[in-house]
Each structure stands twice: as C-alpha cells, then as structure tokens.
Image: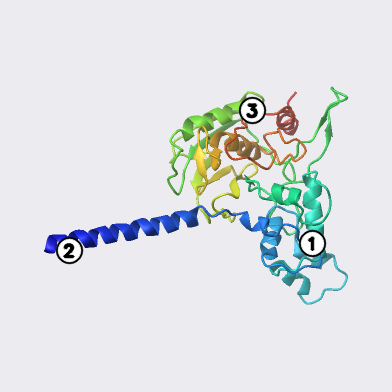
C-alpha cells in the first residue's frame, strides 16, 4: 500500500511543479510594452490608469523630464509639477513629449496616442535613449544632418553620442561574461565575430576576442532585469539590448528575450542584427530615426534579420573617426 501512496504523492508533486513552471513561464513572457496598447486614443486633459508608465517610457528614451520643466519655470510650485511624473494625468508636459516622439519618428504630430504612434512605441527596440535632456541619464544627441562635400547631393543623418566620444585606439579586444545562461545562444562567439567584422570592413578597427578572465575593451553578456549598470532590462518584448559609448565598452542583451541565430518564430530575435546595432553604439554612433533601413535605427522586428550596414551607417562611422 505504501508504494502506491508514495507514487500518488509523487505524481501530485510533479503536477504541482509543472503548474508552477507554467505560471512562471507566462509571467516570464509578459510583454513589457503591452500597456501602451491600452492607452490608445488618450490625449491631453484625460486621467487614465497607466499613463504614469508611459511617462517613464518617454523619460527613459529622452523625451520627457519633469525636473527640467521645474528648472525652466520662473516660479516653482513646491514640487507639484515634479509629482506629475508619477500620476496618470495627460498634462501639457506629456503632450509635448508625445509630440517630440512623433517628430523624431516622422509621425503625424498630433500630441495624442493615435494608432500610428502606439504601433511605433510598442515595437521592440534598443534601450539606448534617442535624445538627451538636461538632468536625464540619456547620453545620445539629437540627430544632425551632415552634408558630404564630395557628394553635393548626398545628405546623411547619422548621429553621435553627446560630445562625440571615440576610441583612441583602433585594435579593440572583447570578452563574453554573462550573469545568466540563455537558450539559443550557443553560437554567440561566431555570431558576434561576424558582427564585428561588418564594422571592421568599413572602418580602421580590428577586433579580437580574449578569454572571459582577461582585461578587455568591450564586455558582452546576457543579463536579466537589474544587472549592475543602472539600466535594468524590462523583460520579454520591450528593450532588447543596450550598449554604452566609448570607452566604457559594455554591450548587454536582455536574457528574457527569445534569441536565435536564425529567427523563424514571431517572438524570436536575431542575435546578429541586434549585435551589429549595439556595436555601433560601442563605437560611438547614436540612433538614426530618419533611415529605417539603417542598422542604427532604434527599433527592430521579431522574426526578421537586418545585419548589413547601410550607407548612412558607413558614413557615420567614417565621419566620427575622420576616415576618408
């Protein structure tokens, strides 16, 4: 009789574990930007649950900063404006931020969360901010138009980090150091080697992998949520990765995404496409919202690959380092 009881209890325990794993899996696959879909149609004057999350979204990517608003006022009002950063009121400041976002991505400037704006906001993207605000942690500059004197009719739209930081050497080493193991990344070394070569072929840089215990200019890794760089990831379907300007050299992938060397499913992310983009940041390039086909465009699409450098990417890296 005892063996039967033990067997029954074992089955119940196994079912409980599977049920818990299923619940955790659903939680793990929570869409980080899904809340924005529920705000579609919101406009100034409304008070809608969840708008404070949108304010944080726009602040993270450089479009909104209530502290700046307070500093620019002639008379402060005891923190009343700053408190709006955490409420659900669609105020003037939020409307202005939405308009800035719409201008950046060449959308109709309505100031409301219209369908086109919501669609753009919910796309998976790089976690590096698009523009800079005083007092914000953002580090990228507004995109600037650069006219090429050799080609009179050619206009480039690449951007650099604030102050145009750059590496003072051309041979860069890199190592891999992750805080979590991630499925689908077994070929990460060869994938990143290929990504580095795309930049090496159009610049003066050479890249060399070193062991994880060696000193390196660039550190690549997969991490989840808070991971020690003051830029926590947001989980599945949101920001995919981020990197830092020269010469910090950190390149981090969000471990909660479904990474693949050859994406086939709708939720799979191509590792090399994202790696090429983030290496661009590591070398000093900012985002490029004017050219959707450029590697440095801020957003990505699941299941798609975009690995080849665009002419604008090439002109940007060469302009930053004074290459002809």
Check the picture and name the quadrant holding the C terminus. Answer: top right
Q: Residue furthest bottom?
A: 78
The residue at which mark 1 appears reads as 43
Check the picture and name the quadrant holding the N terminus. Answer: bottom left
How many residues crowd around disc 2 within 10 Å: few (fewer than 14), some, or many (20 or more)?
few
Residue 131 at least partly seen: no
How many residues crowd around disc 3 within 10 Å: few (fewer than 14), some, or many (20 or more)?
some
Under circle 3, the secondary element is loop
Residue in the image at 86% along x and 73% along y:
75
Residue 321: x, y in percent?
Answer: 72, 31
The residue at which mark 2 appears reads as 5
Q: Work out whether 281 lies above or below 149.
A: below
Under circle 2, the secondary element is helix
Residue in the image at 57% along x and 33% along y:
172
3 or 1: mark nearer the eye: 1
The residue at which mark 3 appears reads as 308
Residue 98: x, y in percent?
Answer: 78, 55
Residue 207 at least partly seen: yes
Camera-nearest residue between 260 and 191: 260
């Amino acid at each position: 009789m005892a063996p039967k009881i033990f067997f029954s209890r074992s089955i119940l325990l196994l079912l409980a574990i599977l049920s818990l794993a299923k619940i955790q899996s659903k939680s793990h696959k929570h869409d980080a930007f899904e809340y924005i879909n529920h705000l579609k149609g919101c406009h100034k004057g409304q008070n809608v649950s969840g708008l404070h999350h949108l304010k944080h979204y726009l602040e993270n990517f450089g479009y909104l900063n209530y502290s700046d608003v307070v500093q620019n006022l002639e008379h402060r009002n005891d923190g009343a404006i700053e408190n709006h950063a955490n409420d659900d009121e669609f105020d003037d400041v939020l409307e202005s931020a939405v308009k800035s976002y719409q201008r950046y991505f060449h959308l109709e400037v309505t100031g409301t969360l219209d369908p086109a704006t919501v669609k753009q906001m919910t796309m998976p993207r790089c976690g590096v901010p698009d523009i800079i605000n005083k007092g914000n942690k953002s580090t990228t500059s507004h995109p600037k138009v650069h006219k090429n004197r050799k080609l009179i009719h050619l206009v480039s739209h690449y951007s650099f980090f604030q102050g145009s930081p750059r590496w003072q050497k051309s041979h860069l080493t890199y190592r891999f150091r992750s805080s979590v193991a991630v499925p689908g990344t077994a070929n990460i070394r060869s994938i990143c080697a290929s990504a580095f070569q795309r930049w090496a072929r159009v610049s003066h840089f050479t890249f060399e992998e070193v062991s994880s215990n060696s000193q390196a200019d660039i550190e690549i890794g997969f991490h989840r949520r808070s991971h020690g760089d003051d830029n926590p990831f947001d989980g599945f379907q949101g920001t995919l990765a981020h990197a830092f300007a020269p010469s910090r050299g950190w390149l981090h992938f969000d471990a909660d995404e479904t990474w693949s060397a050859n994406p086939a499913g709708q939720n799979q992310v191509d590792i090399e496409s994202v790696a090429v983009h983030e290496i661009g940041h590591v070398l000093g390039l900012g985002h490029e919202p004017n050219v959707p086909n450029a590697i440095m465009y801020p957003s990505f699409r699941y299941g798609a690959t975009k690995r080849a450098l665009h002419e604008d990417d090439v002109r940007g890296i060469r302009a930053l380092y004074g290459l002809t």
